[in-house]
Each structure stands twice: as C-alpha cells, then as structure tokens.
Image (cartoon, rainbow, N blue to C red):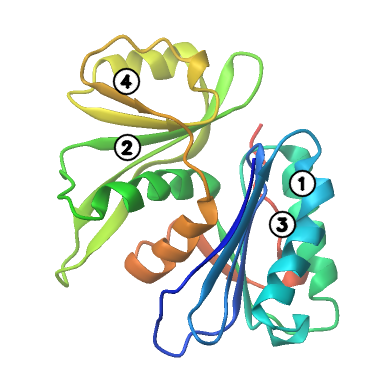
Amino acid sequence: MDDLHTVNGMSMNPNPTLFIETATPRCSIGLQDAQGRWMEHEVEGKGAHSKELTKGVHQLLNDSGLQVDEIQQIVLGRGPGSFTGLRIGASFVRGLCFGKDVPIVMMDTLPVLAGRVLLDQVSGSTWSQDVEIHAILDARRTHVYHWSGQWIDSSDGGRILKTIAPQSIRPIEELDMELSQASAAIVTGFGLERLSLKSSTIQILSPPEHLVRAQKWLLEHTKETSFVEQTNAKDAVPFYLS
C-alpha cells in the first residue's frame, strides 16, 4: 500500500512539523508546512520502515518546498509495538536532528490508534461518552499491547480522549473476558484476529490508515497529556513493554 497526497487545510500560523509513526506494520509519515498544508505518505509491507522512512520524509520535504532545517517540531510515535520499527523511527529522528535544537513530541501509539478511529467517527456525528474504545497491537505469544479510553466532554466545553487503562501488555484470555463483560465497546488495532470477541455489543474496526493524521488531530483537539511527552532528539526513547 502506498499513498501520497496533499490536503489543503489551513491553520493559524503553524510551525512546520514532521509526524512519524513506525510502531505498527505501516510506516506512516505526515508533514504540515508553515501555510498549514498537509501532506502524508504511508507504506505497508516487509521492510517498509527501513526502506521507506528516509525516502518518504525527503519526498514530502521536496514536495512541500521545505528544507530539513526548516522543520521546527517532530511528533514521533513511541510505541509500544514493533521493536524494529520503533528503533528505526527513533534512530532516524536522532540523525535528522543531530546538532539541532528541534523539539520532539513523543506520543503513545495505542491512543493514536483510538484517535484515528475517533477522527473518522467525530466528523459529522456525535460520539457517545458511554462507549469505551480499545486499541491493541499484537505482542506475540499469548499477549497483546492494550490501551482503553473514552471521548468525553472537558470542563472548557471541548472534548478530550481520556485514558481509562494506560498502555500495558495483557494476556489475550484476560482481555477477552474483560471485553465480553463491557456494555458497549469499540476495538481497533493490529492483531484483532487473536481475540475471541463474540459479544453483540462489541464493534470491531479494522486497523485505521494514516495514523499521523490522528497524531496531528490529537495535538490540536485534546488536552489529555498522559500519552504525550515533550523531549529532545537525544532523549527520544521508544516505549518498550515486556
């Protein structure tokens, strides 16, 4: 899968920002320039991260007319997920920012998976606060990486993606039992086939594409900070769970 296009959305004086998510089987990259124009590139397949990350970033920079030195912020998915993908993403950012003082925003991958689903659902519809949303990634053997939350009203009249259960590694049988008892829930992510969900109250959604859209959207639309950390390239360390 290979997709590259520009969305002509405008925002107020944005800083040129690079978005990277390499924790899943998809290598997802996004770029917002100083005029608010959005470009993205995503590839899935064996070796996609090592083959496509550098090429994809430079392609987006070239298409936008930006130079590497003009990037003023990088948003990087920190996992959990693919050890190789996370290592490649973090190494690339450290190399790109070597000798530069570029702020790095580390964002947990599983809330971003949930946020990507919300981004599609929220547009033109009302999202029930009663529905839990669960995001998973395959952790091999008998476990999955798991996070859950809800899209709720905030005190200032906006909405936030509120964490219920932070990112953790869970036995599949335990998570199956928990979800079977939920009054209503949405489950998305990679490794869904490993769950045995039979409840009619569970809605299962295929892994969403272009996770970098959710990185951008969550930064702009939620004040939830439990899954976001500001750091620098030197300290941009992936989040490994074991």
Image coordinates for residue 114, horizontal then vertical, percent: 40, 44
Quarter containing the C terminus = top right
What number is the disc on residue 179?
4
Pointers 3 and 2 in contact (CB under 8 A)? no
Q: Image quadrant of residue 143?
A: top right
User: From the viewer's perspective, is residue 80 above or below residue 217?
Assistant: above
Which is more N-terminal, label 1 or label 2? 1
In the rendered view, tell whether residue 202 sits above or below residue 235: above
Residue at image mark 2: 133
Q: Is residue 136 left or right of residue 120?
A: right
Q: Nearer the viewer, mark 2 or mark 1?
A: 1
Q: Which mark is residue 49?
A: 1
For label 2, the crowd category at 10 Å Cα-Cα, with few meaning under 14, some 14 to 19 and many 20 or more, is: many
Q: Of callouts 1 and 3, which one flags the residue occurring earlier in the amino acid sequence?
A: 1
Q: Where does residue 200 sit, x and y in percent of width and height?
A: 22, 14
Frontmost of labels 3 and 2 is: 2
Going from N to C along the chain, the mark reached first, 2 or 4, is 2
